[in-house]
Amino acid sequence: MRLTKMRRWKMATKNVKRLRIALLAGTASLLATTSLWAKDVKVAYIPCGQVNDGSWSEAGYDGVKAAKDALAKSGTNVTIDYSESLSPSQAEVAARDYATKGYQTVILHCGTYADAAYNAGKDFPNTNFLIVVAPKSVKNVWTYIPAMQDISFVAGYLASKMSKSGAVGVVASFNFSNITWQAEGFRLGARYGNPKIKTFSNYINSFDDAGKAKEAAQAEIDSGADVIYSATDQASRGIYAAAETNGNLAIASYSDQSKLAPKTVLASALANIPLLVENMVTGSVSGTLVADKVYSVGMAGGIGDLAMNPDLAKTVPPDVAKEVQALMVSIKSGEIKVPALSDPGQSEKYDLAALKAK
Amino acid sequence: MTWASLLELTFWIPLLAAGVRVATPLVFASLGEAVSERAGVLNVGLEGMMALGAIVGFLVAYWTGHSWAGLLAAAMAGLAASLVFGFLTIFRGADQIVTGIVMNILLLGLASFLYASIFASAHVVAQLAAIPVFRVPWLSDLPVIGRPFFAQSPIVYAVYLLIPLFWFLLERSPWGLSVRAAGENPEAVDSAGINIWFLRLQAAAIGGAMAGLAGAILAVVQIGAYVDGMIAGRGFIALAIVVFGGWRPWRVAVAALLFGVVDAFQLRLQVSGAAIPSPFLIGLPYILTIIVVAFVAGRAGYPAAINKPYPLRHFSRRQRKPIPADRAAIHPVPQEHS
Amino acid sequence: MSVHVDSAVTERWRPFAQGTGLVLASMALTGLVLLPIGINPIGAYAQILKGAFGSVNALTEDLVYATPIILTSLSVIIAFRCGLWNLGSDGQLYLGAIATVGLGFNRFGMLPPVLLPVMAVAAFAAGAAWAAVPAVLRLRFGASEVIVTIMMNFLAVTIATYLVGGPWASGITPATAPIVSAGFLPILVPGTRLNANFLVAIAAAALLSFVLRRTVFGYQLRTIGQNIDAARYAGMPVNKIRFVSFSCAGGLAGLAGFGEVAGIYHNLPNGLSPGFGYTGIVVALLARLNPLWAVIVAFALAALSVGSGGMQRAMGIPVSLVSILEAVLILLVLATRLLERRA
């Protein structure tokens, strides 16, 4: 059994390779006809984890690939290379190496690589460095921040409306600013949906300890929570396992994960990271990024969306679905401003009236 | 939930249940390691063997669609890894701690490599169906202990069988007697006509198989997915639990449960409104282990012959070279146990 | 006479021949995992070489990566030499880094020439203090230092994570706020990351080698490691020497943390050490507990790691391949008992 599967998998990869070669040949011949104004650009992608993690790193990779397709239309031929799962120190080595080899843009899609980006940026002024969730943009280094608190707020709102027990919870990886924004955004959104709701949060101090994430989710469920939001990376698999065992709902983060637990993942709070990365890469390659601008983009800028699980969408009452839509419109228009709260528990004391104040 | 509710049973019963769940993979790994250490083989490579068990168990369960097949394959994988470990440390006299650390590097790398190269090209994220909870009739209705101990995944009930089995094997069977002697006084075992290398290899193999199972329990039974880094130090924790439990199966199981409860407690305290726990709360399980190892278990100490290769005399087919005397200069081994 | 010289020459070169053989064998064995995924192992190894030695930048990166490994391996060596296991150099490294960052904010307004040395001394002291705990528990209460140091590693990482997210948070990146620029270690080769801590590591190796070979303390330490009963019988202050050497082991690992903060990151990032402590143990073994050889072995393993990044960038092979290669090589070394024969 194992052997045949292996063989099948090998054949599949072979076919993919063949297809790839055919496609390459196709593009090459196409380019040959338009080569007068075609431009070749090399782009490197350095995420925290692996490009197939079904989460954060894969989302960024999808964005880079989308940028490649978009740029191909304007006659720019982009080659993508990537390095996975590096320590911050190794990431800087990789970034410098790409820069020496003449890569036009290096995308560092991991918060811990900020210093790598700034340091390499200083020494290689001819390469653009894009760094996710960092404090500043300087010269050839641009920061992009998915303002996840917006869509987390919507997720919290939806959770509060779907909760029968009057309690919801979030399991987050680390108490680090942008992750905490997400967790607190969810709790605030839940309070906005139902001021009497109880909200719980857990920090498990790991991105990939699925076992601990499961127990954290179970702890919240035992305290009465019946909708759990994930603000972790791969550890989220444990959250779905806990929710599934107890017949509760979960809301995923970053990418659409409803296939992983079709009866449990009600919705996924998309960071639209692919879109954000695509815009950044396209801007960098075509030279349209604004100098020293930090691209902190929330729902007003099109970053953050809710992907409902098609199997479970019908369980959402129509008026709730409408309210969620209305809420998303008012966040996009700026009518409601979701704050970035970086202290766990801060959302409990936040004045809900202040959301609409200018 | 408020701080006052910490005094109520509704807090403690689910906490105990959580402790049992957290402890389950740890009990598997540490029971096996207790046998191995009793025979004088300290396996620091538990973490890697658990990771290997997790990936192999997951892949086999995913390909065959049977969780039990995955568990079996994981046990075999752990066993195979421990044979490599045993060959080096028992037959070749390599240092156990160094070999264990290298096994960790190898197996963690291999697990990560397998997952990346199999699922990277296929571009799928694989998920197994969760194994449902099985409530033991009558027992699960018992007050207080019913829910934590008898409304769990079936694998937990296997633990209840394994603990007395390991106790009998180690402390009541003739085999256990020789194993314990191999760890305390190998010369006696050797002169009694028992092949001490083979005996130690058996003990190490049990340890490896149990570590493989432990990893697979985490991946196949508890999560239904493999995630790189999911073992997250549990192999090292299991090593501590063995010392904590004084190398005796019952006490090892209790130590694992205690560890599970303490770990679950800190997660539950966060839910009860303690904003973000101080590092000392998160580190509580580690601090507790240090204290127990230092002040409770420390005096007993490791089996005397731990990490001491035995130069086989009586039962080698041909005359083997004894372990060179200058080995001590290369890997000095802590000699005395005060 | 000439026969004698010849045999001496072969004796001298034998370890190198054996070593080369083992390296080739482990490359062949590791290649087996590459074949099923349709990758030519020779091409992969060529890329590792190119990634490690292909440019000035690559060469300096080898040294940058080797620096903390040299220090953690020295830390392991000094403890091993007196018969104790230091599996805790990772945690001691974190403590050194925490002390460095804490002082590096320069809240006390120290003058630039004072700041760096104070940071280094504090890092050494913090690592030593962290190591003193398992040392005392072992020497006074008989607690296994193997278990206690591993637990202390977990504890150190927990504290570092807490500081990164809590009191010392920078605001947005998962790292503490940066230290003042007066606390940056000088760069040795402009345009690279090679910093003065590399020289500190080399000096530490030379000093340790001298202490072990030429001083009374070193002699006593070695005697304790070889035969503790004889050392006791000879009236050596066994516990005192073991305590001092284990604390120094922690201090050396603390210096590694100092270098990572003051020389590379200029803050304390989440996930500072990718297991430098465990690599240090491997290096100590391969170097046969010799501090000077540890420098060379650390450089070789660092080059392998740096080169693997190049391989991944060029061929898309997961970096974990290098862990496998490294481990297979060492297991072969252990299996052939190469290290245990006197060359």
Image: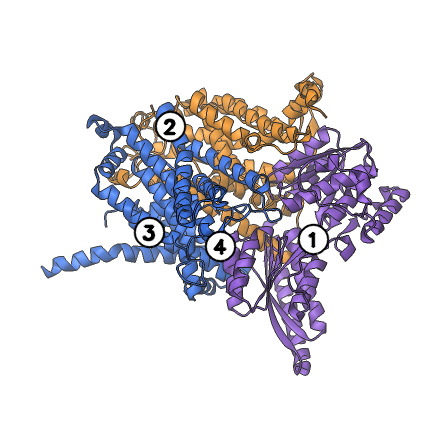
Marker disc for residue C136? 2
**In this figure, which residue is indicated by the disc labeled 4?**
C321
Q: Chain of mark 3?
A: C
Q: Residue furthest right?
A: A319
Where residue B228 is drawn, which disc sits there? none
Cα separation, mark 2 vs mark 3, equals 29 Å
| Tag 3: amino acid | Ile
At horizontal 23% and vertical 35% (from top left) the residue drawn is C220
- For disc 3, the marked residue is C202
Answer yes or no: are tags 2 and 3 on the same subunit.
Answer: yes
Q: Amino acid at mark 2?
A: Val
Q: Residues within 10 Å of mark 4 (few under 14, many from 20)?
A: many
Query: Looking at this view, is A260 or A131 the one in front?
Result: A131
Q: Secondary structure at mark 1?
A: strand
Q: Mark 2 belongs to which subunit?
A: C
* Nearer mark to the viewer, of 4 and 3: 3
Foreground residue among A195 and A38: A195
Chain letter for the part of the structure drawn in purple: A
Label 2 or label 4, whichever lies nearer to me, is 2
Marks 1 and 4, how far apart in space? 33 Å
Q: Are marks 1 and 3 on the same chain?
A: no
The CA distance from mark 2 to mark 1 is 49 Å
Residue that badge 1 annotates: A146
Question: Disc 4 to disc 3, how far (Cα)?
Answer: 29 Å
Kindly report the distance in space between the C-alpha atoms of the residues bearing marks 2 and 4. Answer: 39 Å
Please report whichever mark, 4 or 3, sits nearer to the chain's N-terminal start. Answer: 3
Q: Earlier in the sequence, mark 2 or mark 3?
A: 2
Residue drawn 48% across and 47% down? C274
Using the image, name the chain to which the residue with label 4 belongs: C
